[in-house]
Image (cartoon, helix red, strand yellow):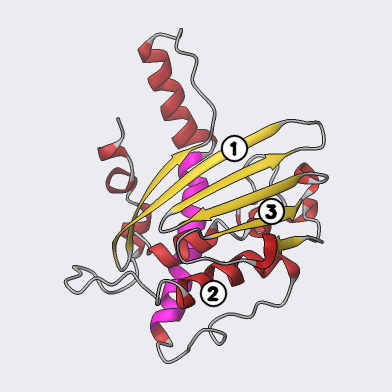
Amino acid sequence: PVGYQVSVENTFDPSHAPFMHHGIGTYSPERAIPMSKFELRDDEISGKRGFVLEHNGYDEGTEGLMATRQFVPPCSNTTVYKHKDRRTETTQLYFVPCGPHETRYIVNVGQQVNKKLPQIAQDILHVLFFNKIFGYRFQEQDLLAMRGQERSLHECPQFTWGEQYVLGTPSDKGVEVFRKWWYDCANGGPYFPRASRTLPASDPMIFDRWQRHAKDCP
């Protein structure tokens, strides 16, 4: 129940994780570290090819890693983490704009469920993951923050690019680059002339897990 703009830029701001997701896994403000590198590869932003960002870690769990985040317009973000112990993690995200404040997320975290498990066991693991371990709480924390962004942007429509956010640290580079692409290459789109909802989400929309995920989950 949030728009394409804030959904995509959220994935280019990894430094929010230790603060926004405090209490999930090992995320904690006490474990956060300053990002010393966050760069636009080849200093290139393309309307068709997008861009590639490179950065280092943002908390104790990611210290020593090198990461790339590749945006391929209009909706693909491929993130690759190369850890100091030589582990590699790949996450593929797609953001399909469905309305001014509606976006369909398609996510592949690169980890497969053991197909030898009975289907009922796979279903139970799925439910535990979303309800008890990670999924819903993690997403709702992000959704609340993104809804707050949309409210602020909605209340200040006169603000133009460069006036909307304070981007004062190296960790803001990802958001800065995406918003530059969004304005310079995508003309601030997409546009929805017949949108059904033009206001940011209400609390019931944010926390309705059935509408948000479960009813369409295979």
> Is 71 one of the magenta-colored residues?
no
> Against 28, is 121 above or below?
above
Is residue 40 among the parts visible in the rendering?
Answer: no
In the figure, is residue 18 to the left or right of 152?
right
Using a 10 Å C-alpha cutoff, classify the residue at mark 2 as few (fewer than 14 neighbours), some (14 to 19) or many (20 or more): some
Mark 3 highlights which residue? Answer: 18
Q: Residue 110: horizontal and vertical position, in percent?
A: 54, 31
Which residue appears at 50% of the width and 23% of the height? 112
Secondary element at image label 1: strand
Secondary element at image label 3: helix
Q: Amino acid at mark 1?
A: Thr
Find residue 13 and report its image quarter: bottom right
Q: Residue 181: horizontal and vertical position, in percent?
A: 51, 70
| Magenta stretch secondary structure, dominant | helix
Mark 2 highlights which residue? Answer: 180
Tell which circle, 2 or 3, labels the residue nearer the N-terminal end.
3
Mark 1 highlights which residue? Answer: 90
- Residue range (magenta): 135-154
Tell which circle, 1 or 3, labels the residue nearer the N-terminal end.
3
> Is 153 one of the magenta-colored residues?
yes
In the figure, is residue 7 to the left or right of 195?
right
